[in-house]
Amino acid sequence: MRPQTNRLPATTGKGLAGAHIDRNRPIRFTINGRVTPGFQGDTVLSALLAAGVDTIGTHAGQPLGLRAGAAPAIAYSAKPNAPENALPMERTPARDGADYRIIAEGPSPGLFARLFQPGRTLGLALDTPNSLVRPWRSIRGEAAEPTDLIIVGGGVAGMAAALAGAHAGLKVTLLEASPHLGGHSGLFGTQDGESTPTENVTALATEIVANPTIKVLTHAEVFAIGEGMVRAHQLDVGGERVESRVIDLPARHIILATGAFERLPVLPGNRLPGTVGAQDAFELAYRYGIWPGHSWLLATSGNPAYRLATLLAESGINLDRILDGRDHANSRYIEFCKAYGFRQFPGTVPLGITPGAGGRLAVELPHGEPVSVDRLVLCGGWQPDLTLWHLAGGESRWNIRRERLEPIGEVAGLVLAGSAAGHFTRRGCVTSGIHAVDRLLGRSGLGVDDPVIDAFYETPDRQMHVADNADAVAPTYLDADNTLMLRPAPPPRRRWTQIFQGAQTGPVRVLSEAPQPLSIGAICAGVGIGLIPPESAGVVAQERVALVPLTRAEPPGEKATKDETGIPPYLADRFGPDAKVALLRHDPSRQLGSGALIFDGEDMLDPRRAIGVVLRTRDGKTEALVAAAVRNVVVRDLGQAIPAEVEV
């Protein structure tokens, strides 16, 4: 059994000793034959990370870091291998004496490999497509009791909306994916006159618990949405064993308070073990008291990451330097870091990361020798999480000044709130939650108070732009999620003999050949590195975010049959039970990208009205999943409508 080498001391200040663990109640469990220690309050993932297990396995020839949102599913060893028994590491509370196994596509390590593999890796081979697929996403939901208002996201915006809805006489259901309410406001600190994030969250949570018209479902991840309904994967943590189910929750009104996520800077080695986002680094330390190693380097293009440096300043962990992709950035946190004496390098970004000696990371810089550290914290700025917004048919457009996707337009019966709606401050998020309820009920209300500090004093966040590194060995990923989407290889350089052949035309492909969803983070990365035109980013997001259908609840005793046609699990039943894989005839000069949606009319844009999707191009032919009894169709690919014919 490995010791908890990455656990910070219980005396660590600034609230980084682990607010959600009880160090007086040690536990231990087994996963794939490995005995892992932890504390009451740990998740399976946090206990593994605390014990020094920071690697899933290998992908594209290099080790891949273990992190929330990109971890293999698990199940109890005694449970049958079925989707309904799968559990997410990051949401599953670790239970003393439990025996888990890992669920992943592709080869898993045998007994010998599990016993003798290096201690920091789970040992999975991840080059099989959909290696980290979420099995429960192929399950039909059980019908739940209708409610008046569903709120997705239990941060300060979602909690404020829940209370406003209850005060308006609505029956409210509040869903939060993590084990606790509160969201991610802790890293962002306070403005003048505000209470601390902890005080604010505690006050809101206390009022919610005391209100009988608000039902709170934690450990409940919403992954699909339709008109007047959301689908969630929920964990029941009340018994000795954690159980899971997929539920469909109908409601008259829906508020999406899904927050914002941290973008992954696009550079070689950006998902090696030892790399982590600033938000994840803060949450692991604050919630579970986890910080690997004794030295670190911060590379950022946003201000809140500087606060992480100030919180760790007195912990004894050495901050080598801070790199900022912005020139002459201003922030109160930047000034605090100067007062601490941290070395700061504005206008500088790392060129790449490679595994170093002794499990350390070698960070390549524009000038000088590579820097060797235990941990690299990468912050590429924040992006509103518009995944569910797009699944519901919402639109967005690229804000060139802010360098991010922002929502536009309206969706009937649905409103955005908080960071997802584009607000920046904690006060703005709280008041936007209240205003979201007013909008749904047709009331004018008081509006949103979002006191953003002037850009002269607080330089806006931006994407971290990284130059190409053709000689890099480590792979470059477009996002930090479980799709493992690699940066496409640049086109070959043209020979001098081709200079008379004219300019090369046609869009550069972002998706790999295997059919898979295109995440909001990957779209942002595509814009940042020039693979997606900024003016097309909103259209690409609307077309390419994967859709999961909200079908009828499964009758008692009925089980979904496994599809053997090579259709990805997230597309099961998406276009009806009679959908089939067929070939598309279209202009041969145009290659259709995987994930492009198919419609039966040229003027259709709403992804919920799609009748099919392009799966792949094989041997020069386009394969698609299409609804039965269709012939002439239109494929919407990167904002263009391409006529096609379904071969019978």
Image (tube, helix red, strand yellow):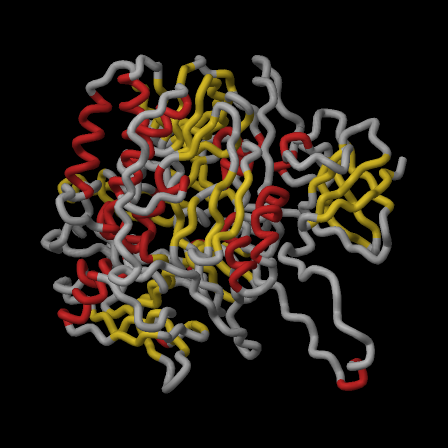
In the rendered view, does 518 fall on the left or right side of 503?
left
Q: Residue at x 40, y 25 (%)?
A: 439
- In the rendered image, the residue lying farthest to the left is 11
In the rendered view, does 587 fall on the left or right side of 268?
right
Q: Residue at x 28, y 71 (%)?
A: 322
Query: In the displayed structure, would residue 611 be above or below residue 108?
Result: above
Q: Residue at x 57, y 63 (%)?
A: 487
As rendered, which of 633 and 395 lies closer to the eye?
395
Q: How far across and how far down the image is residue 398, in percent? A: 51, 52
Query: In the displayed structure, would residue 294 be above or below residue 252?
Result: below
Q: How far across and how far down the image is residue 551, in percent? A: 60, 22
In the rendered view, does 317 fall on the left or right side of 117?
left
Residue 239 seen: no
Query: In the displayed structure, would residue 432 be above or below residue 230?
Result: below
As rendered, which of 60 and 496 lies closer to the eye?
496
- In the rendered image, the residue lying farthest to the right is 648
Give the number of marks. Answer: 0
As rendered, which of 538 and 343 lies closer to the eye?
538
Q: Residue at x 48, y 64 (%)?
A: 266
Q: How far across and how far down the image is residue 4, in percent? A: 24, 54
